[in-house]
């Protein structure tokens, strides 16, 4: 590669990025080996390819000229115009059949020899598919078109091959030959064009077989500028055999490294630079096959290690990342460097776990640390487990961001030779998967230790109904610990204080959660409210937007928002500067390995700033709310919802009327739902939550408007059920029907019967899904009591079903006094 770059620099006399320095070569090699490069291929990448008759494929302008001649059009007519003149039979002959069963060219044959994140191709032929079938491959390929639903690349052994213009083997999806056709395909049914534009703006790509002058490439590159490119990834390349002065300037503008040569030459030189290219195996450095019996396959261990990090205490060199002292959740590196302070709860928890392993007492083997947000429970848990790992206890930290592969995880845990601990932060977010895993581990000698905020413990108890667990409440942050924290941060040059004032300062900040205390220490011990107002006032608008969007997403789901989506929605120019601890509104990554999802560096401060914005600038919050909703839409579909991807989890909470919408945009809720319709009308949760908003309106409006709002709520809820007969929309429909029963006595009997059927079905479906939800029980009990108080009579069939629900509720929800009172009252009535 050095010779190619040197050639263009010397022959053209322009300054350009070079792959000659060791740092650049290392970044390229590391990114290639990690499987983080995506390809974007134009017609030239298929050079040398043949059709089924062993004739050269018509590349570039050749196809346009052929179709223009066939349809007797003007010589300068566009490809789109010529294509639109074809009859269906001609499309079959000159497009679909011509580009099917192709023979790959020399460059296409080399592509399967590497590991790619994704492959986007503007070509409609099947050269690449045939190359992946005919030659030695590192990955299995999954062909997709622009109309295929979005899929997250979760398996390193598979690569998605997306035909952005359509594919000859799926002619029913159509072909795209013009920018207007691009515009017509952008929407929920065709997410890949949007996803490509988002990822190309920031992620490492190799672009080959096309020039930057192509209209479609200009569209995709519109969001990519030198300032938007991520600096923690390898360089991106434009492979161009015939560059000119404009090419060099365009590359500089878009943050691309120009490779002067053919795509085949590029791949051959890359192969020479990285001759051994194993499948990326993730964090398996310390986790060995010999720790299991029988031993797992290497790929099984690689996939398992993406969901569970094996904690190994090692000495690490000091680094400059002091984000922990800005409020960032601790990394294992922070713990290794002893950046935390000694806390009273750590020794107690350590003694409890150590005793379990020493005495082999495995009853009550689920422990949940509960405390308020920002109180330091994660740090205390990680310190405990790090020290226990140093004593020889095996510790696995749960790192999955989407649905867990229960079969694989349980298989490896059942085969692990030693007793172990599974640590799960944000326990409630992962409880469904963790409890399914817990029941699939068929051995007694393990523990699960989770951390969760106190206000979510009722939810934890509800999901874990029938499974015992121990609650552990750490002692509150105190003045002695606050003094230790001040002294430690002073040693890192993060604060300054007079020693005589230490007792008073420590006593002052001890009243705050520790995550807020570190913020005050770094800001001259000013009150938290003053700090929040000042950073919100002093930050520029782009910083505010990105920070508030990350805070909102993290409030919805702890992973936050994808870097690519954040950059696409609010501009990625100079965004990397916001990932510095001393930034006025600093951001960080929630996933330290992949570094894909963004959250506020101090999550607690992020929520305080978000609430300040809610109070002071509702218009800004609405725009951010709508931008997040619109930009995550292409990444969410029914499959993503089932897999519980971070984007799907964020969307689920973002639309939650009762818990999130009313808190963040109380006066703009209807505006939000209406603006989201074009992006989300396929989704049952959208209509369900829109229905709840209308229900709320009906309760607050005058009688005339109340009736209209309730009618709309009922229509939206029924539409949600038509889209998906799921417990959630069924429960919402039941609630709204019960309100209809209350407001319209004339149809009380029919409304109640329909409500009972919906809620009864919701409870039944929850049971079939091995889930327990309290909401349909609450609604059916309170609604039935109201119906009976109003003089209604229950048919025998409903009475029998109701008694079963009452019995189940008392055994399932014994921890909830409200439902027990409802159940007792209703039992007496029937």
Image (spheres, rainbow, N blue to C red):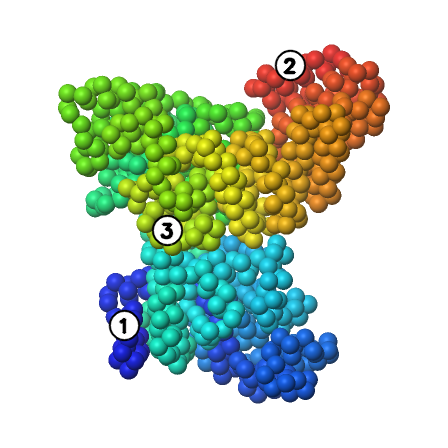
In this orientation, does residue 227 appear?
A: yes
Q: For the point 70% across and 13% down, which residue is it?
A: 825
Badge 1: residue crowd in 10 Å (few <14, some 14–19, many ≥20) = few
Mark 2 or mark 3, which is nearer the start of the sequence? 3
Q: For the point 70% across and 21% down, which residue is it?
A: 781
Q: Is residue 776 left or right of residue 594?
A: right
Q: Is residue 333 left or right of residue 365?
A: left
Q: CA distance from mark 1 to mark 3?
A: 25 Å
Instruction: Name the front one of labels 2 and 1.
Output: 1
Q: Which residue is mark 2?
A: 821
- Can you say whether 486 is above or below 554 in the image? above
Residue 15 - label: 1
Q: For the point 61% across and 54% down, which residue is it?
A: 188
If the image is split into quadrants, where does the C terminus sit? top right
Q: Is residue 441 left or right of residue 270?
A: right
Q: CA distance from mark 2 to mark 1?
A: 78 Å
Picture coordinates of residue 782 (x, y %)?
A: 70, 20
Contact between labelled residues 3 and 1, with CB atoms less than 8 Å apart = no
Question: Could you say whether the residue bearing mark 2 is in a helix, strand or loop?
Answer: helix
Question: Could you say whether the residue bearing mark 1 is in a helix, strand or loop?
Answer: loop
Residue 575 - label: 3
């Amino acid at each position: 590669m050095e010779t190619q770059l040197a050639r263009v620099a010397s022959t053209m006399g322009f300054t350009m990025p070079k792959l000659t320095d060791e740092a650049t070569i290392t970044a390229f090699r590391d990114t290639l080996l990690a499987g983080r490069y995506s390809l974007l291929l134009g017609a030239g990448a298929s050079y040398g390819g043949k059709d089924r008759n062993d004739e050269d494929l018509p590349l570039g302008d050749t196809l346009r000229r052929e179709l223009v001649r066939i349809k007797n059009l003007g010589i300068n007519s566009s490809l789109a115009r010529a294509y639109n003149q074809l009859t269906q039979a001609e499309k079959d002959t000159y497009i679909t059949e011509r580009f099917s069963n192709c023979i790959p060219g020399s460059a296409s044959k080399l592509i399967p020899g590497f590991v790619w994140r994704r492959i986007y191709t503007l070509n409609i032929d099947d050269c690449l598919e045939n190359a992946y079938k005919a030659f030695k491959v590192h990955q299995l390929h999954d062909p997709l078109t622009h109309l295929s639903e979005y899929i997250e690349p979760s398996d390193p052994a598979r690569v998605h091959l997306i035909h952005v213009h359509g594919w000859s083997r799926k002619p029913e999806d159509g072909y795209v030959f013009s920018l207007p056709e691009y515009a017509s395909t952008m929407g929920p049914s065709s997410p890949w064009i949007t996803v490509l534009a988002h990822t190309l703006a920031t992620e490492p790509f190799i672009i080959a077989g096309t020039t930057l002058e192509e209209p479609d490439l200009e569209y995709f590159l519109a969001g990519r500028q030198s300032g938007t490119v991520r600096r923690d990834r390898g360089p991106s390349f434009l492979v161009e055999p015939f560059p000119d002065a404009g090419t060099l300037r365009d590359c500089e503008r878009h943050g691309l490294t120009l490779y002067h040569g053919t795509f085949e030459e590029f791949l051959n030189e890359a192969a020479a630079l990285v001759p051994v290219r194993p499948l990326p195996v993730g964090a398996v450095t310390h986790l060995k096959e010999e720790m299991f019996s029988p031993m797992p396959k290497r790929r099984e261990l690689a996939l398992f290690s993406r969901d569970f990090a094996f904690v190994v205490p090692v000495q690490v060199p000091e680094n400059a990342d002091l984000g922990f002292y800005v409020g960032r959740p601790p990394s294992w590196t922070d713990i290794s460097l002893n950046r935390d302070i000694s806390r009273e709860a750590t020794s107690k928890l350590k003694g409890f776990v150590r005793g379990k392993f020493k005495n082999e007492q495995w009853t009550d083997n689920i422990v949940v640390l509960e405390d308020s947000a920002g109180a330091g429970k994660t740090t205390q848990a990680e310190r405990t487990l790090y020290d226990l790992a140093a004593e020889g206890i095996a510790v696995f930290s749960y790192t999955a961001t989407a649905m867990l592969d229960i079969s694989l995880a349980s298989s490896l845990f059942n085969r692990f030779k030693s007793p172990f601990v599974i640590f799960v932060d944000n326990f409630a977010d992962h409880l469904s998967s963790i409890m399914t895993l817990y029941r699939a581990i068929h051995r007694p000698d393990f523990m699960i230790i989770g951390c969760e905020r106190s206000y979510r413990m009722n939810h934890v108890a509800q999901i874990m109904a029938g499974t015992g667990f121990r609650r552990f409440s750490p002692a509150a942050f105190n003045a002695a610990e606050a003094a230790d924290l001040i002294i430690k941060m002073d040693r890192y040059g993060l604060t300054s204080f007079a020693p005589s004032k230490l007792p008073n300062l420590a006593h002052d900040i001890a009243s705050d959660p520790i995550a807020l205390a570190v913020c005050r220490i770094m800001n001259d011990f000013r009150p938290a409210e003053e700090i929040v107002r000042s950073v919100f006032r002093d930050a520029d608008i782009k910083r505010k937007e990105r920070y508030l969007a990350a805070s909102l997403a993290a409030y919805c789901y702890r992973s936050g928002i994808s870097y690519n989506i954040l950059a696409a929605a609010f501009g990625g120019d100079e965004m990397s500067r916001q990932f510095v601890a001393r930034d006025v509104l600093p951001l960080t990554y929630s996933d330290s390995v992949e570094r894909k999802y963004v959250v506020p560096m101090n999550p607690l401060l992020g929520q305080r700033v978000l609430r300040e914005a809610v109070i002071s600038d509702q218009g800004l919050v609405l725009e951010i709310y709508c931008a997040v909703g619109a930009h995550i839409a292409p990444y969410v579909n029914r499959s993503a919802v089932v897999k519980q991807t971070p984007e799907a989890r964020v969307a689920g909470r973002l639309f939650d009327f009762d818990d999130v919408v009313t808190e963040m945009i109380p006066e703009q809720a209807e505006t939000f739902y209406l603006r989201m319709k074009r992006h989300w009308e396929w989704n049952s949760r959208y209509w369900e939550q829109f229905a709840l908003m209308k229900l709320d309106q009906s309760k607050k409006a005058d009688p005339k408007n109340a009736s209209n709002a309730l009618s709309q709520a009922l229509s939206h809820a029924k539409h949600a059920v038509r889209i998906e007969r799921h417990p959630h929309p069924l429960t919402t429909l039941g609630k709204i029907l019960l309100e209809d029963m209350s407001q319209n006595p004339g149809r009380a009997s029919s409304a109640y019967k329909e409500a009972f059927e919906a809620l009864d079905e919701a409870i039944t479906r929850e049971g079939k899904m091995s889930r327990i939800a309290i909401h349909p029980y609450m609604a059916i009990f309170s609604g039935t009591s109201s119906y009976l108080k109003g003089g209604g009579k229950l048919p025998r069939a409903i009475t029998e079903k109701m008694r079963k629900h009452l019995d189940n509720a008392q055994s399932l929800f014994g921890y909830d006094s409200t439902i027990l009172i409802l159940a007792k009252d209703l039992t007496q009535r029937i």
